[in-house]
Image (cartoon, rainbow, N blue to C red):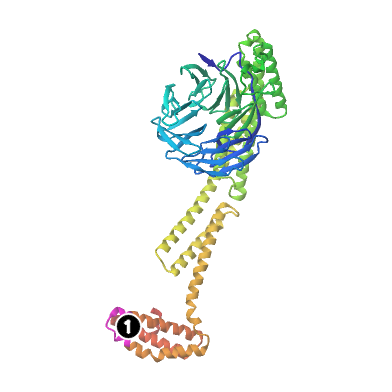
């Protein structure tokens, strides 16, 4: 048989959002006191169920955890190559299990921790002894894993789900292959094994003969993200913005909990609460039935009494009018998104109870028309508010670029703004066309035109800003690369100082074109400060070397004595050099003598020793003249000194 997502037994459940916890979670579990969340930032977060305040942050783990589990004493987090373990209470880390295969999913059952891993492997870890076993149950990666005291249900991305019987000392024994569906989501309870498909269908298999006993067909064909089950209720999270609750005793949908704009990844029920890991964070939802909390773990659906079933047309119409009045009140309070939800719930109630309303067709049609009118108006107001908010954000970013030459927003934040604005504009165009008989649709079109123009202008400004930033980065990177090349080539300090001087001039010229307090100015200033520091260091090193000779003499008498000593041995030293037969050796000694004469000349000039300056100049010119080749031995003394 097949269960349908509508009918005269549908219960009008509605979500009461208690709070939203800030956590980018992918998997949730809970115990009596705490809610545990496996988060993408490599941490497990613990929240108190009494006030929903954070209690502890566990981690950082080696990779983002894919699941979190708890028993009476410990917290387990499954990562790619490790299973981390913390002690409850103080939440101190105990340690971790190393895995030989990459973990994809996991479950905790009794004294065993099961990991669904790559290559179709099921890994079993005994909690007390840490004894590990693994078996290849599928050919492809094991992506689905569910277990209770008796059986294990597994599935691979390209293989059908299989049910296995537990074995304490050997590999699990196959009991049944459930379906030809691949890449499914599995769950179960004492009565059934439940399989969620990529089309959104839920297939129910009995645990006696392992036969398909029911297929639950949703109103929309959306892949199943997660399944939570305890008899007789089933909570299914779709990849879109709703949760579906089914009554397994009747095979019918109890209701849908919709939260506009939110995508669910995981949902789990806890009495009257549903904890949902979503794109907005962890949403804490209380399930309400006629303004009373509804326990999803109650043993019987009928426990609240048959009077709650909306089989009477008068009950249905009265409930619709209540929802309509609530929507009108929210609209008057300018809570337009919330009023949209109430009007949509009222329309859904009319649709779900079509059979019961066959006796009052005129009233049903009248309410449908009125609700559609109210819904259209609320949608227009809600979209106008959304467009205005986006326009303010776009204008703020544009003003930042105008005034500061930069934006404080990160790249991913800017990208998210562009995406949100483009999506809102597309939705606004469609809505305005659909509601063309309402004056608000023209207001929506007008402000949408303004947002579109502002968006293009901001994108153009950001493009110019990014171009300037890229040019500044290209300049600094180019200079940095050339500087590193000079260091690797072991160039002289004089060459490096010259390069830094040219680089600083180039950066300073670019700085004149940059706006004050802009990102470009920051990039160039930072680079300029770095090179100025290097330039100062190298200059001080070179100048200290140049001043060494001067520092050797503290008085005129010391300098005169040294110079007279050099002149006294000049003739002897020249004779020794010119008598050398080895050309290279002769040249080296000649260069050393010339260097000594130059130092003496600098010292004589410093201490104003005119006679010694003249004698040293003559000696230097004569030495250079004697060392030149015959064809080059031309020119007067002043030319020789200048050439040296």
For disc 1, the neighbor class at 10 Å (few under 14, some 14 to 19, many from 20) is some
Q: Is residue 22 visible?
A: no
Q: Residue furthest top?
A: 359
* Residue 388, position as x, y percentages in the image: 64, 35
Residue at 62%, 45% (x, y): give it. Answer: 399
Q: Nearer the viewer, residue 640 or 44?
A: 44
* Residue 107, position as x, y percentages in the image: 50, 32
Residue at 58%, 49% (x, y): give it. Answer: 406
Residue 394 within the segment the image draws in magenta: no
Q: How many marks?
A: 1
| Residue 142 against residue 214 in the figure, above or below | below
* Residue 460, position as x, y percentages in the image: 54, 43
| Residue 611 against residue 585 in the figure, above or below | below
- Quarter occupied by residue 618: bottom left
Q: Nearer the viewer, residue 223 or 563?
A: 223
Q: In the rendered structure, which segment of residues is drawn in magenta?
A: 576-587
Identify the secondary structure beneath mark 1: helix
Work out which quarter of the rendered image holds the C terminus and state it.
bottom left
Q: Which residue is mark 1?
A: 627
Q: Nearer the viewer, residue 296 or 342?
A: 296
Left or right: residue 573 compared with residue 329: left
Residue 578 within the segment the image draws in magenta: yes
Q: Nearer the viewer, residue 453 or 530?
A: 530
Left or right: residue 372 compared with residue 569: right
Q: Is residue 348 visible?
A: yes
Q: Residue furthest left?
A: 581
| Residue 519 against residue 66 in the figure, above or below | below
Magenta span: chief secondary structure: helix
* Residue 494, position as x, y percentages in the image: 45, 70
């Amino acid at each position: 048989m097949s269960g349908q997502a509508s009918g005269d037994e549908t219960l009008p459940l509605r979500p009461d959002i208690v709070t939203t916890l800030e956590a980018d979670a992918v998997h949730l579990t809970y115990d009596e006191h705490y809610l545990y969340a496996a988060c993408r930032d490599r941490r497990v977060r613990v929240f108190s169920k009494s006030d929903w305040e954070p209690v502890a942050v566990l981690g950082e783990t080696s990779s983002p955890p894919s699941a979190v589990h708890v028993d009476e004493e410990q917290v387990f987090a499954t990562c790619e190559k490790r299973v981390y373990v913390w002690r409850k209470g103080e939440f101190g880390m105990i340690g971790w299990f190393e895995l030989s295969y990459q973990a994809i999913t996991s479950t905790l059952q009794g004294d065993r921790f099961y990991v669904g891993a790559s290559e179709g492997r099921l890994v079993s870890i005994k909690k007390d002894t840490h004894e590990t076993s693994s078996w290849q149950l599928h050919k492809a990666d094991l992506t689905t894993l569910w277990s209770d005291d008796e059986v294990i249900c597994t599935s691979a991305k390209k293989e059908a789900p299989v049910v296995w019987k537990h074995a304490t000392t050997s590999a699990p024994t196959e009991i049944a292959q459930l379906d030809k569906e691949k890449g499914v989501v599995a769950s179960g309870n004492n009565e059934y094994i439940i399989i969620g498909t990529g089309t959104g269908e839920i297939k129910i298999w009995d645990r006696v003969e392992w036969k398909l006993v029911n297929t639950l067909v949703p109103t929309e064909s959306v892949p199943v993200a997660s399944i939570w089950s305890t008899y007789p209720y089933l909570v299914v999270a779709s990849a879109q913005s709703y949760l579906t609750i089914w009554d397994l005793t009747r095979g019918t949908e109890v209701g849908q909990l919709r939260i506009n704009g939110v995508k669910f990844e995981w949902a789990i029920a806890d009495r009257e609460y549903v904890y949902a890991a979503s794109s907005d964070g962890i949403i804490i939802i209380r399930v309400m039935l006629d303004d009373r909390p509804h326990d999803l773990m109650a043993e019987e659906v009928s426990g609240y009494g048959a009077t709650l079933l909306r089989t009477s047309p008068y009950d249905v119409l009265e409930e619709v009018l209540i929802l309509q009045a609530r929507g009108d009140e929210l609209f008057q309070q300018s809570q337009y998104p919330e009023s949209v939800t109430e009007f949509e719930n009222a329309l859904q109630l009319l649709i779900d109870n079509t059979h019961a309303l066959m006796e009052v067709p005129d009233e049903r049609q009248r309410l449908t028309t009125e609700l559609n009118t109210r819904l259209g108006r609320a949608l227009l107001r809600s979209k106008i508010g959304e467009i205005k908010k986006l326009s303010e954000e776009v204008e703020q970013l544009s003003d930042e670029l105008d005034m500061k030459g930069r934006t404080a927003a990160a790249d991913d934040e800017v990208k998210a703004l562009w995406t949100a604005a483009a999506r809102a504009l597309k939705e606004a165009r469609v809505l305005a066309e659909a509601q063309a008989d309402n004056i608000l649709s023209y207001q929506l079109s007008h402000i949408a035109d303004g947002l579109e123009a502002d968006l293009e202008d901001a994108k153009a400004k950001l493009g110019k800003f990014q171009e300037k930033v890229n040019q500044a980065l290209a300049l600094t990177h180019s200079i940095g690369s050339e500087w590193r090349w000079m260091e690797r080539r072991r160039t002289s300090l004089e060459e490096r100082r010259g390069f830094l001087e040219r680089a600083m001039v180039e950066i300073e010229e670019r700085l004149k074109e940059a706006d004050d307090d802009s990102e470009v100015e920051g990039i160039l200033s930072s680079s300029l400060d770095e090179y100025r520091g290097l330039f100062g260091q190298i200059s001080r090193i070179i100048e200290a070397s140049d001043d060494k000779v001067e520092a050797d003499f503290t008085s005129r008498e010391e300098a005169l004595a040294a110079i007279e000593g050099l002149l006294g041995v000049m003739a002897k030293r020249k004779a020794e050099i010119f008598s050398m037969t080895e050309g290279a050796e002769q040249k080296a000694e000649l260069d050393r003598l010339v260097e000594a004469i130059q130092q003496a000349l600098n010292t004589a000039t410093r201490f104003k020793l005119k006679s010694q300056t003249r004698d040293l100049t003559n000696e230097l010119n004569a030495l250079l003249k004697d060392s030149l080749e015959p064809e080059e031995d031309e020119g007067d003394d002043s030319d020789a000194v200048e050439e040296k």
